[in-house]
């Protein structure tokens, strides 16, 4: 009897063990097959990182036209005028103060180029301004005439007591008056500039 029971028990135990193992293995296999919920990996981003430098197209170089000169610029940049037709032939060469009674102008000329042109007034018939070729003999920036008790700023003396100088009377009354033989200048700044530019010894031509 015992010999028959033992194999039966052994078979039962084996069957139970097989069932238990099968259940355990099946559950493990099922867990492995299903597994925990794992998210799919995100695809690599195709967007450009904000930290990367933005690529901008290079614009074509703009064409710029030359600026249109203004009248003021033209005056300040222009070379001294050349007007030989209006100059005495003696004034067309060298550095010379060229004075024209007909034009009522005093011009500072350098080899035919007019560097400065100023309005001028001359002596009366009883005290005429001398004509001819002279030279600046001396200069006085703030001269006072003791003969006529009058101021003669920026005087360039060329013939005795006759000089080229600024005249307040000329500035005030214009050509209604006359000098005592001097060459009067109407512009204070012009007379000052002429005085500064003309050294002693400069030729003076009056016609």
Image: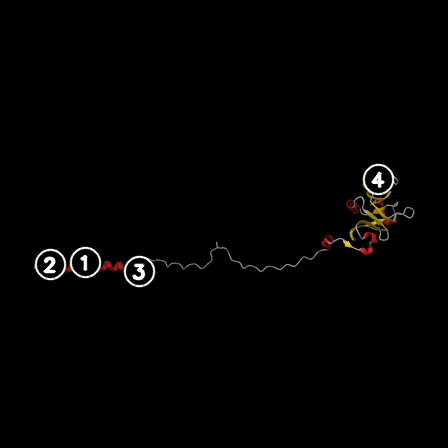
Q: Nearer the viewer, residue 56 or 141?
A: 141
For marks 2 and 3, the one nearer the N-term is 2
* Residue that numbered label 4 is attached to: 144
Distance from Cα at disc 3 to Cα at disc 1: 25 Å
What residue is shown with label 1? Answer: 17
Marks 1/2: CA–CA distance:
16 Å
In terms of image quadrants, where is residue 192?
top right
Q: Position of residue 111 (x, y in %)?
A: 78, 52
Label 1: few (<14), some or many (≥20) within 10 Å? few
The total of numbered circles placed on residues is 4
Q: How is the image coloured?
A: secondary structure
Q: Secondary structure at mark 3?
A: helix
Quarter of the rendering occupied by the N terminus: bottom left
Which element carries disc 1, helix, strand or loop? helix
Q: Nearer the viewer, residue 75 or 90?
A: 90
* N-terminal label among 3 and 1: 1
The residue at the point 11 percent across, 58 percent down is: 6
Q: Are marks 1 and 4 in contact (CB under 8 Å)?
A: no
The residue indicated by pointer 2 is 6
**Residue highlighted by disc 3:** 34
Q: Nearer the viewer, mark 1 or mark 4?
A: 4
Question: Regarding mark 2 in the picture, which secondary structure is present there?
Answer: helix
């Amino acid at each position: 009897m015992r010999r028959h029971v033992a194999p039966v028990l052994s078979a039962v135990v084996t069957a139970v063990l097989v069932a238990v193992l099968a259940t355990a293995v099946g559950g493990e296999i099922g867990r492995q097959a299903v597994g925990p919920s794992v998210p799919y990996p995100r695809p690599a981003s195709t967007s450009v990182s904000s930290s990367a430098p933005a690529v901008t197209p290079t614009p074509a170089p703009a064409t710029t036209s030359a600026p249109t000169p203004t009248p003021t610029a033209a005056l300040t940049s222009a070379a001294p005028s050349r007007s030989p037709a209006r100059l005495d032939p003696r004034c067309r060469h060298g550095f010379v103060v060229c004075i024209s009674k007909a034009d009522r102008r005093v011009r500072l000329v350098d080899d035919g180029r007019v560097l400065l042109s100023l309005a001028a007034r001359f002596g009366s018939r009883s005290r005429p301004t001398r004509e001819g070729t002279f030279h600046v003999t001396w200069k006085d920036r703030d001269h006072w005439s003791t003969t006529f008790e009058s101021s003669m700023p920026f005087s360039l003396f060329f013939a005795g007591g006759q000089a080229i100088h600024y005249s307040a009377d000329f500035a005030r009354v214009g050509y209604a008056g006359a000098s005592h033989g001097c060459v009067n200048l109407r512009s204070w700044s012009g007379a000052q500039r002429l005085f500064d530019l003309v050294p002693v010894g400069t030729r003076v031509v009056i016609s």
